[in-house]
Amino acid sequence: MTLKWDGRECWALVLGASSGFGAAAAKAWARAGFGIIGVHLDMRATRADAEAVRDEIAEIGVPVHFFNTNAADDAKREKVIASIAEIFEERRATGEQPMIGAMLHSLAFGATLHYVTEDGERKELSRKQLEMTADVMAHSLLYWTRDLYHADMLQRGSRVYAMTSEGAILAVPTYGAVSAAKAALEAHVRQLALELADAGITVNAIRAGVTDTPALHRIPGWRQLVEAAQARNPMGRMTRPEDVADALTVLATPQTHWMTGNVIGVDGGEVMGTRESAEIP
């Protein structure tokens, strides 16, 4: 049976549902009783992984619909939302009152290049790459949230979450475009939280620790990030996608109605300092 809040049938929308944080959150929310709508972009090499996530959710026993499309494309976003409207209309025909109770923005696709380099074998970040990174990893949160709100799918009590990182406040080699996008994402979270407060919709960012995901592997020098996180984290290990999914399951409830506009750390204390046993430079 699908989870209900105040008699309304709860669905979760996950942008970036086929791997990493998105896949873990989709499965965790399914176990909590949410119907799942997943949006992902996978080509032939990874399509089977996305289908495996969808099938695992289906086995849990909740309704699940996956859309393999570019979530950052305006026309494709409109098409997915139209499809969700059809799904919800079918649910209403059975007497249900569907809503998106939880949404996760976990889109990770951006350029990781130097801003400035004298090395002729390295490329510098272009305007197009910078704008694309910001559009996918930051601005798309606004477009999805706004369109879903106007479609009456996000309603009073809905919870919106976006995945940020420590990179929003730190400088890491070749991470500049993503870092700028994460900073913009956090600004969008605050602004949306402010403007949707009267509607009873909360918006928060989730700052995970360094996590071994496909997105991490696209960052040059990612192994050094892993080593630093393992040495620094007080819990003695890296963050896992399931750690974040567990937190999102607890957060996506009616009881968190007074939490909005925050950057919530789910990192085992990684950001706060160095383990006692680690070397301090």
Image: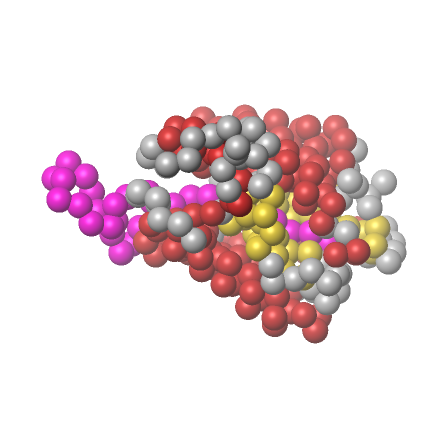
- Residue found 51% across the figure and 63% down from its top: 188
Residue at x-position 35% and y-position 48%? 171
The residue range painted magenta reads 100-129
91 drawn magenta:
no
Q: Is residue 66 visible?
A: no
Label the magenta part by its dominant secondary structure. loop
**What residue is drawn where x is 44% and y is 52%?**
168
Indicate whether 28 appears above or below 84.
above
Tell me: 279 left or right of 18: left
Relative image position of residue 108 (x, y in whole percent):
46, 43
Q: Quadrant of the N terminus?
A: top right
Q: Is residue 228 left or right of residue 207?
A: left
State yes or no: residue 126 in magenta: yes
Q: Nearer the viewer, residue 142 or 255?
A: 255
Name the image quarter holding residue 100: bottom right
Q: Is residue 47 above or below residue 91?
A: above
* Colouring of the image: secondary structure
Question: Dividing the image into 4 quarters, which one contains the C terminus?
Answer: top left
